[in-house]
Image (spheres, grey):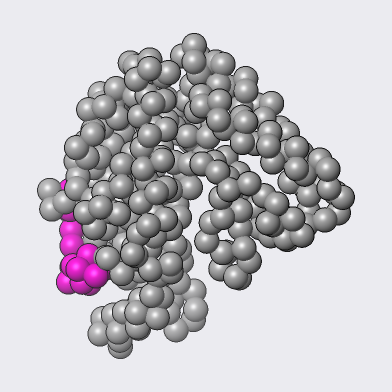
């Protein structure tokens, strides 16, 4: 590997489409990993986030012959996993046949991976929501955002959402979501979230633009035009993964819906009749599961802080 020959590897695995089971003849090869920082990096507070290398040019799409490597430091990987970031959640569920190098540290992380699960699974759910909102063709979304616009237009633009919090509609596409890390309340409108402190004069132009853009995209999507099929397949994948965690407590690779996801990625299906209905119903299901889940609201970061300290003491000092 051309990036760092002296890394102490915690884990190295095949990643991306080869992990999900959605690889095609055009898919390049991705590798992900986690490394243990050097003693000097820890003592000098210079632990890097990651090291990366790509054989591609960086100016054009990778070919099947290209290879990408990315290795996260133990500290940064734990941070990503505590935030529910997609890449970390994926890595935590990689099957044995995808693992090229491992260690007892990695095996211990995987044994306790359920401690990263929360009912929010922020990265997975919010990514899927954004894509569902971007390409969805439900008229109810347009009606929902128009309802909120109508309320905001009657108010002083310097008011904050908190001032009219009880006036905001609670519907299929408009609802309260968990507070941000600072404890501020948040409200979601058709996949877009706003803090309670956001001024109406800030929120209103965003919703108006969404209404205009969404309406046009919905028309084109219904005609199978201007669709980012790869992004839609990623949204479906994230939703399937979230559902599996919320119902089974794990993710199994390759994904059982891999063939369908591959067809979506390659644009082989009709969006309106074969994809949109699946995405819409899947997101409704996932959001309901998340709201009713018994998982904790937040990750137990204290557990993972102790884990990092104990690992460093054992391996470096």
- Left/right placement of residue 63 relative to residue 46 reads left
Q: Identify which residue, 66 or 108, lies in the foreground.
A: 108
Check residue 105 for magenta coloring.
yes
Residue 158 x, y percent position in the rendering: 86, 54
Task: Give x and y (percent) for residue 289.
Answer: 35, 51
The residue lying toward the viewer, choosing from 265 and 292, is: 292
Kindly tell me whether residue 76 is visible in this rendering: no
Regarding residue 211, the answer to whether it shows in the image is yes
Q: Quadrant of residue 302?
A: bottom left
Q: Residue at x 56, y 55 (%)?
A: 176
Does residue 299 appear left or right of residue 137 in this picture? left
Q: Is residue 306 left or right of residue 231?
A: left
Question: Does the magenta portion include 134?
Answer: no
Majority secondary structure in the magenta region: helix
**Residue at far top of view:** 223
Residue 19 percent coordinates (x, y): 23, 42
Which residues are the magenta region? 98-112
Q: Quadrant of residue 283?
A: top left
Image coordinates of residue 43 in percent, x first then y, are 44, 84
Quadrant in the picture for the C terminus: bottom left
- The answer to whether residue 39 is above or below residue 116 is below
Q: Nearer the viewer, residue 273 or 110?
A: 273
Note whether 70 is above or below 178 in the view shown.
Answer: above
- Quadrant of the rendered image containing residue 165: bottom right
**Residue shown at 68%/56% (left/top)?**
166
**Pick the front one: 13 or 37:** 13
- For image coordinates 53% across by 56% down, the residue present is 177
**Residue in view at x 67 percent, y 49 percent:** 168
């Amino acid at each position: 590997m051309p990036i760092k020959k002296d890394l102490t590897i915690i884990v190295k695995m095949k990643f991306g489409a080869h992990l999900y089971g959605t690889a095609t003849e055009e898919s390049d090869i991705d590798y992900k990993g986690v490394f243990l920082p050097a003693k000097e990096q820890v003592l000098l507070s210079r632990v890097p986030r990651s090291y990366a290398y790509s054989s591609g040019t960086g100016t054009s799409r990778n070919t099947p012959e290209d290879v990408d490597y990315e290795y996260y430091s133990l500290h940064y990987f734990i941070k990503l996993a505590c935030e529910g970031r997609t890449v970390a959640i994926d890595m935590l569920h990689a099957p044995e046949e995808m693992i090229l190098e491992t260690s007892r540290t990695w095996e211990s992380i995987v044994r306790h991976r359920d401690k990263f699960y929360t009912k929010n699974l922020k990265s997975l759910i919010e990514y899927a929501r954004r894509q569902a909102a971007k390409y969805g063709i439900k008229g109810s979304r347009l009606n929902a955002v128009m309802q909120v616009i109508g309320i905001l237009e009657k108010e002083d633009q310097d008011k904050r959402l908190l001032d009219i919090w009880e006036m905001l509609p609670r519907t299929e596409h408009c609802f309260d979501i968990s507070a941000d890390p600072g404890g501020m309340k948040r409200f979601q409108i058709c996949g877009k979230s706003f803090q309670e402190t956001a001024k109406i004069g800030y929120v209103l132009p965003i919703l108006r633009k969404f209404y205009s853009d969404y309406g046009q995209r919905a028309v084109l999507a219904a005609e199978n035009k201007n669709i980012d099929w790869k992004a839609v397949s990623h949204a479906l994948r994230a939703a399937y993964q979230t559902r599996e965690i919320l119902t089974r407590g794990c993710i199994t690779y390759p994904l059982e819906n891999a063939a369908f996801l591959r067809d979506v990625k390659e644009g082989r299906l009709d969006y309106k009749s074969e994809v949109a209905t699946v995405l819409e119903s899947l997101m409704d299901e996932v959001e309901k599961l998340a709201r009713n889940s018994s998982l904790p609201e937040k990750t137990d970061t204290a557990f993972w802080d102790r884990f990092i300290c104990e690992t460093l003491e054992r391996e470096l000092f």
